[in-house]
Amino acid sequence: MNALAITDIPTITMEPSWDEWCEYGRSLKQHEARLTTHIRDFRFIVARWYEYGVEHWRRPAERIAREIGFDPETIQNWAWTARHTEKLRANGGDGLEYEHYRLLAAVRDPEQQRALAERAKRDGLSGAQLRREIKRIKSGDASPRGDSDAVRTVRYSAIERLIDDLCAEAERLLASGDPIAQAQADVKLDCAARLRAALGER
């Protein structure tokens, strides 16, 4: 995890201790408004912070992130976007906003993704304009598909509703303050995360 040299934000070692990791997350949240304005990759920084914690400490890290004020579902979406645009950003994605990356993350062909990114920068496309361009390209894709777009849309919508229901139920359980209910909430959040990851890989 790269150090972040920002006033009032503590630097973090390559392998932070539990206390360092927690303090770094609190600082990110405390200065979120300012950092979002001045650091283009702020969402990806938070996503790396969260993924490191979950990888090393799992449930306790998830709980701390919620207590700090970060929404795990939102961070997981940021992380998904980061993973699927990593090469694009490494090869010079400057000039693009998070919304551009979020849309480009769904483009599976690396060359097509790169071409769209270059056009978005060259022509100054907004997120809405890039979305229309991606939709136009996909609508002209004549490659064979196992399911129709309509069928896939219905299936995806059902899974997304299930994810929303799981997260809502988990939040209700967490609000109870009961240890058993919190353990049940962890299971539901884990299921929601797995479903979201599976949905993103399709």
Image (tube, grey):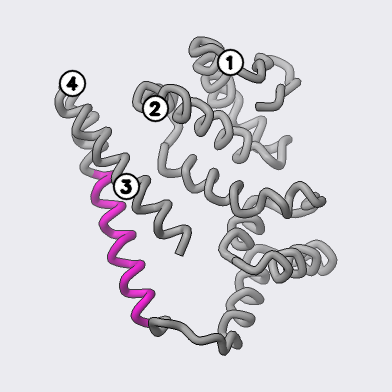
Q: Which residue ends up furthest to the right in the rendered image?
A: 122
Q: Are the residues tagged 1 and 2 within 8 Å (C-beta)?
A: no
- Pinpoint residue 17: horizontal percent, then vertical percent: 54, 12
Mark 3 and mark 4 in contact? Answer it, CB < 8 Å: no
Real-space CA distance between mark 3 and mark 4, rounded to the nearest whole angstrom? 20 Å
Q: In the rendered image of this protein, does residue 123 appear above or below residue 56?
A: below
What residue type is disc 3 on?
Ala
Classify the position of the N terminus by image quarter.
top right
Q: Nearer the viewer, residue 32 or 161?
A: 161
Residue designated by label 4: 179
Badge 3 or badge 4: first in the primary sequence: 4
- Residue at 66% x, 76% y: name it: 133
Residue nearest the observer in this picture, 102 or 176: 102
Question: Looking at the image, is mark 1 or mark 4 earlier in the sequence?
Answer: 1
Which residue is labeled 1 in the image? 16
Circle 4: residue type: Pro
Bounds of the magenta segment: 150-168
Mark 2 nearby-residue class (10 Å; few <14, some 14–19, many ≥20): few
Q: Position of residue 26 (x, y in %)?
A: 52, 19
Element under disc 3: helix
Q: Earlier in the sequence, mark 3 or mark 1?
A: 1
Predominant SS along the magenta part: helix
Query: Mark 3 highlights which residue?
Result: 192
- Residue that badge 2 annotates: 58
Residues under labels 3 and 1: Cα distance?
Answer: 28 Å
Closer to viewer: mark 3 or mark 2: 2
Residue 13, position in %: x, y?
A: 66, 16
